[in-house]
Structure formats: C-alpha cells, structure tokens
Image: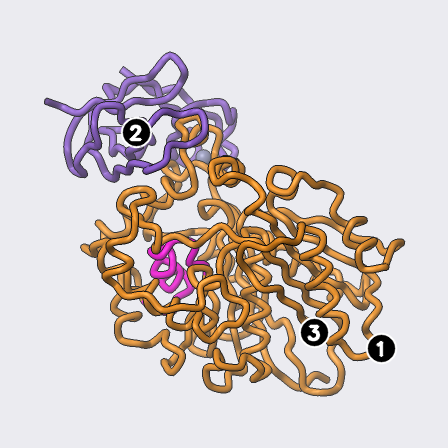
Chain colours: A orange, B purple
Amino acid sequence: MSVAIASTGLTKFGRRNEGLIELLVEAGREALEGAPASARRPDCVVVGSMAAGALAGLESLVPRVANGLGLAGLPGWRVESASATGAGAFQLGAHLVASSAFERVLVLAGEKMTAQATGSTTTALARSLSANEVRHGATMPSMASLLSQLYLARYHLSIEDVAEVTVRNRACAQGNPKAQFPSAVTAAQVNESRMVSSPLRLLHVSAISDGAGAVLLTRPSSRESVVVRGMGQATDVLEVASRPMEPLGFRATRQAARAAYDQAGVGRKEVQTSEVHDAFAPFQLIDLEDLGFCGPGEGLAWTRAGRGDPNGVLPVNPSGGLLGRGHPVGVSGLAQIIEVDRQLRGEAGRMQAGSPRVGLAQSVGGLGSHNFVTILGREQSA
Amino acid sequence: MITVFVCSGCGLHFPSDEIRRCPECGGTLSAKELEGRGRVAAATELSVPPEGWAAPHRLVLAQVDGGGLLLALATSGTPEVGSTGRLVRRPEGQLSWQGDG
Ligand SMILES: [Zn+2]
C-alpha cells in the first residue's frame, strides 16, 4: 500500500478530567504539530469511538472534532468496531489515502469511560455481545472467563500460569509515560488480586480508562518513512458458543492475519515487534497462536522462554499492552499502531526494543467478533 | 427437553432462531429437540452482578449431548467443570443449568 504515517499523538491514559472531545483534540493537535509543515492541514478526518453515546453522552463526533481542531468544513467519517475501533478507524483512513480519495487523513480514536459508574460502563461494553448472551446477563469479563477456561483446559494450563502475562506486560509498562499502570506486579499479586469473574482476577483484566490517539496518514515521501505494508480484518459468528472452535482461539484474528501477511508480503518470522490485544491476560496467549508466532497451545511456553520479551526474538507488547497502558476501548487499536510506529522509528524511549523494521498490531473487537491485524514497515519509498 | 436450531448448510447450532438465518453460511435453521443432558465445560461467577441482576450471577458453557456448546445460567451454586446435569429453558428464554445431585 502506498500509505505512510506522517505523525502521531497519544494522550496519557487513565482517569482524566477532560471530556471526550478535549482528549481527541489533544491527541489530534499533537499529531498535527508533529507533522511536516506541508502536511499539517488534513483534508479528511476519521474518528473512532466505541460507545461515545453511552459512555460520554455524545454523538456526532466528526463535526465536534473538526470544530475542536479549528477545521470546520472538513469531511469525515465515524467508525465503530467495538474494542477494535481504533484499528478499524486506522484501516479506513489508510484505504482513503491508498485509493487517492484524500491526500492527508487524520485518524483519531477516543473514549471517555470513567464518567459513568462501573456497572453502567460494563453494560455498555456488553452490547457488543450476541442478543442471547446479553439475555443471560453475560458481560465481557464473564464471556472472556468462559472462553479462557476452554483454552486453559484444552492445553492443560492453570489460571495461575497466566499471571506470567500480566507480570511481563506490567514490567514493560514501567517505561511507558502514557501508561495507566507504570508499575511492576508480582505473580503472587496477580493471583491474590480480587476476583472479577472467576477465575479471572483484577490483574488479569485490563482497566477502564480515558484517552485518545491520533495518526496523520499521507502518501509516502521520498525519505525513509513508516508505511502501511498490510492490513486485514474479519468478522465472526457473534454467539461465542456456536462458533467453530478448532483450533481454540479467535478465527477472526487468524483470517485478518492471513490477509495482512499476504498483502505485506511477509511471514510471521519477519515481524520484529508487535502489540497484541491483551484485554484479558489469557487472550495474549491465544493471540500469539492465532498470529502464528507459535503453535496451538504453545503461547505460555513461548512467553516463559522470553521470546516475546523486549530483548527476545519478537517483542510482544513492549508498551505494556492493554494490561499496562489501560484500555479505553475505542482507542486501544490505534494506540497499538502508534506504539509500533514509534518502535519502528526508534523513538520509543525506555520502551525501545531493538531496531525493528517490521511491526504488527492486532486488535480484538467484542469477544472476537471483529478483529484486525495491521503490519507496518520502515522503508524507503519510491 | 430443549429446542436448539441447526443450520441445514453448515451444521452449526444456535440457541435460538431469532437470527432467522445461519450467520456462518446464510442457511436455513431447523428446530432440533434435545434431552438437554450434558456436562459443564466452563463456569464463572461474576463478583459484581451485571446491572439488573441479583448476586450471585453465574454462567456456564455446557457441552450438551448432540447439541454442542450452549450458554446457560447456573442458579444453584457454581458447578464444577466436568460435572453432569441438564439444561432447561426458562420462560424468559434463557437456558438454565441444573446439576445432577
Ligand atoms: Zn450455516
């Protein structure tokens, strides 16, 4: 694809005093101010938010953002893809540039989750589940717990084993100035944290958070730049229990990954940095397998061997992931892409893990019903 | 007895026919009566029940004989994974798990 990342912006995640639009404008201004002077005026905006109406009491986000940026008149679209919204917004923006419909597309994603009581937020997030699941009172944590148990049982793992994921991601988050939780935790702390939806505990679950991100997309210049190499996405049957379950994981991730690898012309062994969707700690193990980083059932052993560590063969979530950074649901997919971009530029500060030239971001929407994979590369464009 | 719905095209089963067509292949759904017996494949209890629900709120995925996995409420204790029982349909439309013994 002939699409480059000109600049990015990312707010600090966590409980923020600002409203949704202020957060989006903060990220958007950072991206525009970081762009070359010739690219600072976008000709289109794409805004992602999973549940702005339910969580922030706002709709009609495109004109609000355009107004906030002093760019009234700008055309644009809003995107919603549940907890993968940010990835969906990015991919739409990239298609708009690749198709030559627009030259400079500002992609933003924002979520304001802490203005509501936790119960209301949980109810809003559960609306991405099937009607039958909602009828049973299912929530994202309870469905994630059930699916995780199937995975753990299949491969003879225990929930205590999974603490490894949180411990490693939180260790990485210590280097992330934007993270909600820039502090290390021990396996004992994970396994003794309060129960959320048995056997998933608080430190297995990414946190409700506020935040926003922005990426300015353009055509590649003649200089070396970070470009979009491949993208894929797929939907799946909403009802989790009705899906084909072999191999156990997210079929939509596997389909999205296949499309992204094919378009990028790379295999998974050429990926040198990655951000994957660890909304629930067991999901990271599933992601590693769905992306082909390791075989089915090998995610934990692969992780324990340090292969995904910052100094490993394929760093996974060097930013701290959703578990460390926080999970403003509509933003995380874009934040992952921003983190990969910064790794490829060598501008990730204390999070920098080697000198990668190919990076991958993977996002899970809902309970695996709309997943995305995006592959970026640092390269000289023609 | 419980009723599930099976796709004539791909064989996937669904807990209700409100979706009208198979979401996997667009095939038609046929009602299938099951005894509802099976075993618990996974079970969870939410520490804080969802809005509108009383504590404790428990869910199971039940592997049903002849019917694949089905989501159900567990109203009498948190069932052990692997334990046996049967599903019944509540008037409100949900499935409910009743463990043996
Ligand atoms: Zn079908």
Q: Amino acid at mark 1?
A: Ser
Q: Chain of mark 1?
A: A
Cα separation, mark 1 vs mark 2, equals 59 Å
| In front: label 1 or label 2 | 2
Mark 3 Cα-neighbour bin, 10 Å: few <14, some 14–19, many ≥20: many
Secondary structure beneath dot 3 equals strand
Q: Amino acid at mark 3?
A: Ser
Boundaries of the magenta span: A277-294
Check disc 3 and report the residue beneath it.
A7
Whole-percent x and y of residue A56? Answer: 64, 42
Q: Chain of mark 2?
A: B
Residue at x 30%, y 76% (from the top left corner) = A306
Cα separation, mark 1 vs mark 3, equals 12 Å
Ligand 1 visible in quadrant: top left
Check disc 2 and report the residue beneath it.
B56
Mark 1 Cα-neighbour bin, 10 Å: few <14, some 14–19, many ≥20: few
Residue at x 65%, y 75% (from the top left corner) = A227
Mark 2 Cα-neighbour bin, 10 Å: few <14, some 14–19, many ≥20: some
Give the quarter of the image for residue B35: top left
Is residue B67 highlighted in magenta? no
Q: Chain of mark 3?
A: A
Check disc 1 and report the residue beneath it.
A38
Q: Residue furthest right?
A: A73
